[in-house]
Image (tube, grey):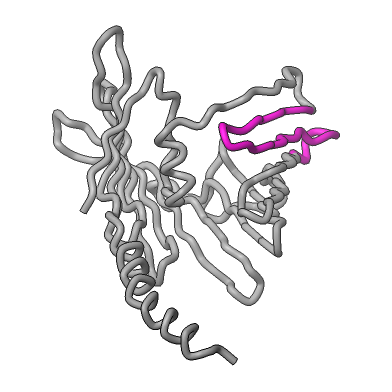
Amino acid sequence: MATVDENNTMMKKLPQLLFLIFILGCSPKIKSITEYTKNNNAFTKSRVAEFDKKGYKVLERNFGKTRSNRIVRIQYENGKKVKETDCDYFQKQDTCVVRQISVYEYNPKENLKIQTMYESDTAIRFIRKYHKIGNLEVIKTSTWEMFPSKDPDPEKAMKLTDSVFYDSKGREIKRIHHNEDFDKPWVEIFKYSDKGYTKGISGTRMDTTRFYKYSKPDKLRNKKEIDFEFKDTTAFKYEIKYY
């Protein structure tokens, strides 16, 4: 049993602990991330991602093309992504033409997520199933990439399977890509350190191993689990705004 002195010490520390929890809970939430691309000695805006106050990415917009630029809008229900709409924005006409729509369904009992991507005319481009158990996720894709159809024939689909392994921190450590049209899969291996990570690729004509050093944006992304991919900071820079 705790002594009177120990109880008094705990009571004195309680306000400090509550204050620390309050501060951590009220840490600034990211509102937007703007990416700038280096062209010669100048930087031009190339991408903007917007987040809601819960931390979910709700929009990603690209800039730089002379004819049109891609805009992606994302919808959530109960913390899960349910719809993603891709459209091409034409500035001259001030209109966004829908190209693809992805709909997501969930089966919690089977740890299953299903993504169906439709063309603008509702023809199905692919159906992708994510099944995760423990540290292994199996992703199976049936795609009619060249011939989307409103009533696709499963027998005519190209079938792809990815097996993804994660470590105890939820980081990807191995990915095996299998295409039924090829005899052997190709493999990606990831190894992590405090300064960065190594990515090795084998089973292809150009097997490689590269080291990627963490930049400050990368460290922020890993710490806050931000749904945003930062690029090489020697050619890109980022501006982050908070709520």
Residue 189 lies in quadrant:
top right
The one nearer the camera, 181 or 187, is 187
Task: Tell me which residue sits at (25%, 26%) in the image.
Answer: 45
Q: Position of residue 105 (x, y in %)?
A: 51, 66
Against 71, residue 66 (above or below) is above
Quadrant containing the N terminus in the rendered view: bottom right
Against 208, residue 48 (above or below) is below
Q: Range of the magenta residues?
A: 179-202
Residue 134 lies in quadrant:
bottom right
Q: Position of residue 113 (x, y in %)?
A: 57, 63
Quadrant containing the C terminus in the rendered view: bottom left
The residue positioned farthest toward the top in the image shown: 40
- Image position of 198 (left or right of 184): left
Q: How many marks?
A: 0
Task: Tell me which residue sits at (72%, 39%) in the image.
Answer: 177
Q: Position of residue 199 (x, y in %)?
A: 66, 30
Q: Position of residue 229 (x, y in %)?
A: 44, 38
The one nearer the camera, 88 or 231, is 231
Against 187, residue 243 (above or below) is below
